[in-house]
Image (cartoon, rainbow, N blue to C red):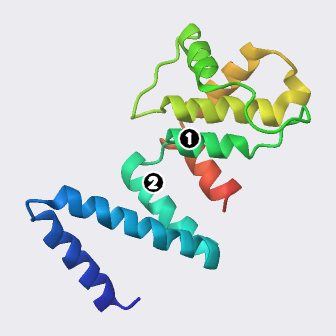
């Protein structure tokens, strides 16, 4: 798309935002964009992924949302021979609470934690077996590493795992 095309799209969105019925128009536009995104997902998966990631980061910064975290975890191939989550969000939130782990938008949220705890299980089962406390400690160390800025789990998954 040329810059003229981009500017036209931006100007159109800016005009919609000034309209009294902007919510209804944006709802319809979102529905229409979803249809086109489905086509792009098939014809140019890399384009789809780049755009989806940009939209996700606008809304969630560099944190997992529920949908993104569940999808990412569902793709994990675990060292114990299983696939997907070992712990669900209820389990991961409960174990965080019992370990005194607090969620915050400036550090990590419950979905970052859910992803990371499951990732630790997926990757280190051969070493840690059923030692939940060790997984919790490892996940906490991973997410609170001072050398890496906020969003470590999401950035790792999007830029390393997904490329």
> Alpha carbon of mark 2 to alpha carbon of mark 1: how far?
24 Å
SS at circle 1: loop
Q: Position of residue 62 (x, y in %)?
A: 47, 47
Q: Position of residue 13 (x, y in %)?
A: 22, 71
Report the side of 28 relative to 1 (left or right).
Answer: left
Decide: few, some or many residues near mark 2? Use Cα within 10 Å; few <14, some 14-19, many ≥20.
some
Front one among 100 and 15: 15
Decide: few, some or many residues near mark 1? Use Cα within 10 Å; few <14, some 14-19, many ≥20.
few
Front one among 115 and 83: 83
Q: Quadrant of the C terminus?
A: bottom right
Q: Quadrant of residue 69?
A: top right
Q: Quadrant of the N terminus?
A: bottom left
Whether residue 9 is situated above or below residue 85 in the rendered picture: below
Question: Residue 27: which numbered mark, if any?
Answer: none
Which residue matches tag 2? 56
SS at circle 2: helix
Report the side of 159 relative to 121 (left or right).
Answer: left
The mark that comes first in sequence, 2 or 1, is 2
At horizontal 67% and vertical 20% (from top left) the residue drawn is: 136
Front one among 127 and 59: 59
Q: Position of residue 15 (x, y in %)?
A: 14, 72
Report the side of 112 relative to 116 (left or right).
Answer: left
Name the outermost residue toward the top: 98
Q: How many marks?
A: 2
Question: Residue 147: which numbered mark, if any?
Answer: 1
At horizontal 58% and vertical 30% (from top left) the residue drawn is: 113
């Amino acid at each position: 798309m040329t810059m003229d095309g981009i500017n036209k799209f931006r100007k159109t969105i800016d005009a919609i935002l000034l309209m009294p019925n902007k919510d209804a128009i944006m709802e319809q536009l979102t529905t229409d964009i979803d249809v086109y995104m489905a086509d792009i997902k098939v014809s140019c998966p890399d384009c789809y992924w780049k755009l989806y990631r940009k939209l996700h980061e606008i809304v969630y910064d560099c944190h997992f949302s529920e949908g993104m975290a569940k999808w990412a975890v569902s793709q994990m191939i675990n060292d114990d021979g299983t696939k997907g989550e070992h712990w669900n969000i209820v389990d991961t939130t409960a174990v965080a609470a019992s370990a005194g782990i607090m969620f915050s938008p400036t550090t990590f949220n419950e979905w970052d934690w859910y992803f990371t705890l499951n990732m630790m299980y997926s990757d280190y089962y051969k070493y840690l077996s059923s030692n939940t406390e060790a997984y919790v400690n490892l996940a906490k160390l991973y997410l609170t590493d001072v050398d890496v800025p906020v969003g470590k789990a999401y950035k790792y998954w999007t830029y390393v795992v997904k490329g």
